[in-house]
C-alpha cells in the first residue's frame, strides 16, 4: 500500500464479479504483469496498464479457445 492505494505486488478478489487478480499494482490500478481469473472460467495472463489489458497476453476460455498476442486498451490487436 502506498498512501492508502494498492501499489506493488498483490492479490484482489472483486466482490462485484468474483474475479481474482494476482499481480502488479501502480497507484491503485492493475499495471504491469498479472493474471486475472473470472468466475466464468476465462483467464488472462499478461500485461496490464491503467486497469486494462495492454501489451502481450494470453486469454483462455473454458472450452479450449485461446488468444495469444497483443492487446491495446483492453481489445485484441492482431
Image (spheres, rainbow, N blue to C red):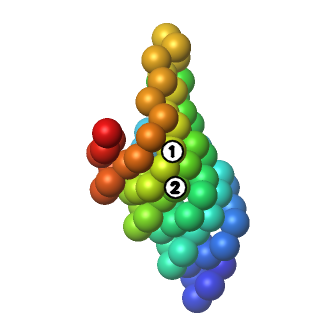
Foreground pick, 30 / 69:
69
**In the image, is residue 22 above or below residue 36?**
below
Mark 2 lies on residue: 47
Quarter residue 51 falls in: bottom left
Disc 2 packing (10 Å; few <14; some 14–19; many ≥20): many
Q: What x and y, as percent, mark residue 27?
A: 51, 78
The label on residue 13 is: none
Give left or right: position of 44 versus 50: right
Q: In which quarter of the image is the N terminus?
A: bottom right
Foreground pick, 8 / 13:
8
Q: What x and y, as percent, mark residue 15?
A: 50, 45
The label on residue 57 is: 1
Q: Which residue lies furthest to the top in this view?
A: 63
Q: Quadrant of the C terminus?
A: top left
The residue that appears at 46% across and 17% down in the rendered structure is: 65
Q: Which residue lies furthest to the right in this view?
A: 9
SS label for mark 2: strand
Amino acid at each position: 500500500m502506498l498512501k492508502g492505494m494498492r501499489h506493488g505486488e498483490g492479490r484482489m478478489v472483486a466482490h462485484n464479479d468474483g474475479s481474482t487478480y494476482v499481480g502488479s499494482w501502480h497507484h491503485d490500478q492493475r499495471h504491469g504483469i498479472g493474471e486475472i481469473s473470472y468466475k466464468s472460467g476465462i483467464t488472462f495472463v499478461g500485461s496490464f496498464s491503467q486497469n486494462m489489458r495492454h501489451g502481450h497476453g494470453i486469454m483462455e476460455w473454458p472450452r479450449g479457445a485461446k488468444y495469444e498476442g497483443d492487446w491495446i486498451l483492453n481489445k485484441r490487436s492482431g
